[in-house]
Image (cartoon, rainbow, N blue to C red):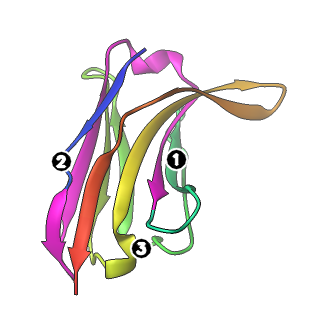
Amino acid sequence: VDLVESGGGLVQAGGSLRISCVASESISQFNRLGWDLQAPGRQRESVATITSDGDTNYADSVKGRFTVSRDNAKNLVYLQMNGLKPEDTGIYFCHADRRSGGYYYTVAWGQGTQVTVSS
């Protein structure tokens, strides 16, 4: 499966942005979808995930500001980002996961979309 992100850009602190990820195949087949952030000088970290049941999980740093959602009919995953902060700057990667033995493992990554938040 190919994942393609879009919607990144430059936004002022306090602003909002919605990034999207479209899959080349049905996303219903994946147990979980998510977004990771590669910030400058930092390791890639999980930002938000959503399971096939619609359960969501967020990094503490984005709780209350970011919302992850999925549209199975359109094979799309979204990340709505509100109240953006300069530390949210980086490349956001979409990923698709499957589950086995109680553990999730990633089967596909997108190429990333750049989000820059100016202070």
* Callout 2: SS: loop
Sequence-earlier tag: 2 or 3: 2
| Front residue of this view, candidates 76 and 89 | 89
Q: Which residues are magenta?
A: 9-38
> Disc 2 vs disc 3: which is toward the camera?
2
The residue that label 2 is drawn on is 7
On screen, residue 28 above or below 56: above
Q: Is residue 107 left or right of residue 71?
A: right
Sequence-earlier tag: 3 or 1: 1
The residue that label 3 is drawn on is 64
Q: Is residue 101 left or right of residue 82?
A: right
Q: Position of residue 94 (x, y in %)?
A: 42, 39
The residue at the point 28 percent across, 75 percent down is: 84
* Callout 1: SS: strand
On screen, residue 98 above or below 83: above
Marks 2/3 in contact by CB < 8 Å: the verdict is no
Residue type at mark 1?
Thr
Question: Within 10 Å of the Cα at label 1, are there few (<14), some (14-19), or many (20+) other Cα atoms?
Answer: many
Quarter of the picture containing the C terminus is bottom left
The residue that label 1 is drawn on is 49
On screen, residue 24 above or below 116: above
Q: Position of residue 86 (x, y in %)?
A: 32, 80
The residue at the point 70 percent across, 33 percent down is: 104
The majority secondary structure of the magenta stretch comes to strand
